[in-house]
Image (cartoon, rainbow, N blue to C red):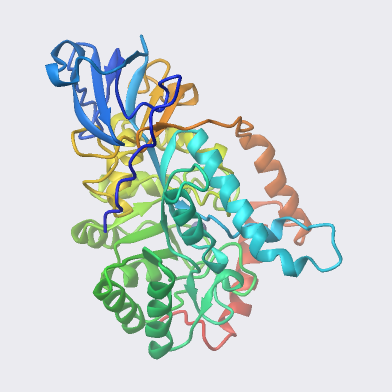
């Protein structure tokens, strides 16, 4: 389901938006495989024309056809494919803001649109040139995708799900398409198709942030997930599951889903417990998994849930980069999350593939974006220094190019994990003084009992 590649506008006086140009730097990482440099040991160059990459290779080998094009030499920098966020929420954050008017409800749609623009532009400012939105109220993400393509706002390439499909009172019901039967599921899928969604997002388990659910409970039967997956695929849509609980992960994999968000293997006691045979099923089916590798998630202090990403990687699962940006984490968490993946054991080269070519493939842009090779979209970033030697180089970008055009970056406040952890701690305290890991687990068990009492939320088939 490759999106049409947007062509660039006419050249401007400064040449910055030149439809044809050559970027040169000490290194050009292609994203095709770990550590692969277009110029080998020599300096690299990328020639772009009308928003598409015309050629990539060693600067010395630039073909005569491109020799007269304007050259921008970035010196000791590294050119690499634009980064990919596979799990954002573009348009589900409006409730976090309370407009100072008597009836803020009438502004909800406008707030969702505005917040989606803010998050998307912050991501692009940090080098994320393609974003998959997995859950937005009111199709704000689909509207934003269209607005970007129409040139109304500058932003990243967007793959959009619209509202997540969930049960009545299920996880994230406030944003969702609430359904309770197979006919409802088919109607929801077709409604999303009609509204222009690229991917169908399903809440296959409960979540950490919904008071009416528990993250380890499966929300749908295998038959329901199969009906959804089959109908979505029939319509050319990919299918993505939110799944924390192991049973929900297993069912999503068996039902033929393309993408699993979280994949955290949360068991009925609220702790994560890796199950290799489920990972093997995911690997065998070629399903992509994003794992939020930031320190505030999930909320059990001291439990390194990010380690599940390493377990999945070791079993051959296609791990990609997704941070729940816009719902759980700010855009600025992106590069911090990459360093977390490296810290838990993924090789740096693997992290860069997860963040570029594999991420693009995971969101339906295989062959379109994520690799610096002829015919791919000219979505690239220029980092001062060498991210292949130190991922922190990604925090020092000198240029972001989307569809051949330089994106005017905004200043984004830096990610502050300590402050976020303190805020999470304060929230836990406010929710009943749960301060120790045991307290948190107990609070989850209590919530699970409430959730299990809801007739539509099943623990097992
Ligand atoms: Zn999410």
Q: Is residue 362 left or right of residue 170?
A: left
Q: Is residue 366 left or right of residue 322?
A: left
Q: Is residue 430 left or right of residue 108?
A: right
Q: Is residue 397 above or below residue 226?
A: above
Identify the residue at horizontal 57%, vertical 46% (top origin).
119
Q: Is residue 247 above or below residue 409?
A: below
- Whether residue 446 is visible to the viewer of this picture, yes or no, is yes
Total numbered labels placed on residues in the image: 0
Identify the residue at horizontal 51%, vertical 48% (top origin).
152
Which is nearer the eye, 9 or 170? 9
Which is nearer the eye, 4 or 461? 4
Percent across and percent down for residue 44 are 24, 17
- Quarter holding residue 224: bottom left
Q: Is residue 83 above or below residue 382?
A: below
Percent across and percent down for residue 58 are 18, 16
Which is nearer the eye, 237 or 166? 237
Which quadrant, please, contains the C terminus? bottom left
Percent across and percent down for residue 64 are 13, 16
């Amino acid at each position: 389901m490759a999106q049409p590649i947007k062509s660039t506008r006419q050249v401007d006086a400064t040449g910055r938006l030149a439809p044809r140009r050559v970027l040169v730097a000490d290194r050009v990482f292609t994203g095709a495989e770990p550590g692969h440099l277009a110029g080998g040991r020599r300096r690299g160059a990328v020639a772009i024309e009308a928003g598409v990459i015309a050629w990539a290779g060693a600067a010395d080998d630039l073909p005569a056809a491109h020799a007269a094009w304007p050259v921008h030499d970035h010196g000791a920098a590294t050119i690499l494919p634009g980064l990919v966020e596979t799990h954002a929420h573009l348009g589900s954050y409006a409730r976090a803001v309370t407009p100072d008017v008597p009836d803020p409800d009438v502004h909800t749609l406008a707030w969702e649109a505005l917040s989606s623009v803010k998050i998307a532009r912050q991501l692009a400012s940090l080098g994320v040139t393609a974003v998959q939105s997995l859950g937005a109220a009111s199709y704000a993400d689909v509207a934003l995708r269209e607005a970007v393509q129409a040139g109304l706002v500058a932003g990243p390439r967007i793959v959009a799900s619209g509202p997540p499909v969930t049960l009545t009172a299920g996880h994230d019901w406030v944003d969702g398409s609430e359904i309770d039967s197979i006919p409802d599921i088919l109607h929801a899928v077709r409604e999303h198709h009609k509204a222009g969604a690229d991917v169908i997002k399903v809440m296959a388990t409960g979540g950490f942030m919904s008071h009416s659910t528990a993250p380890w409970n499966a929300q749908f039967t295998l038959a329901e997930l199969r009906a959804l997956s089959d109908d979505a695929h029939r319509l050319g849509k990919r299918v993505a599951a939110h799944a924390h609980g192991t049973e929900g992960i297993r069912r999503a994999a068996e039902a033929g889903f393309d993408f699993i968000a979280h994949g955290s293997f949360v068991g009925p006691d609220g702790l994560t417990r890796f199950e290799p045979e489920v990972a093997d099923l995911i690997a065998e089916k070629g399903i992509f998994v994003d794992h939020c590798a930031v320190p505030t998630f999930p909320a059990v202090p001291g439990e390194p849930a990010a380690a599940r990403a390493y377990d999945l990687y070791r079993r051959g699962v296609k791990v990609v980069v997704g941070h729940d940006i816009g719902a759980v984490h700010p855009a600025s968490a992106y590069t911090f999350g990459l360093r977390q993946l490296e810290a838990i054991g993924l090789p740096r080269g693997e992290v860069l593939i997860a963040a570029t070519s594999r991420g693009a493939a995971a969101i339906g842009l295989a062959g379109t974006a994520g690799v610096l090779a002829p015919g791919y979209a000219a979505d690239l970033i220029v980092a001062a220094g060498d991210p292949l030697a130190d991922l922190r180089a990604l925090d020092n970008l000198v240029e972001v190019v989307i569809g051949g055009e330089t994106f005017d970056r905004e200043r984004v406040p830096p990610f502050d994990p300590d402050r976020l952890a303190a805020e999470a701690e304060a929230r836990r305290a406010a929710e009943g003084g749960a301060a120790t890991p045991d307290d948190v687990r107990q609070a989850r068990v209590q919530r699970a009992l409430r959730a299990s009492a809801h007739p539509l939320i099943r623990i097992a088939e």
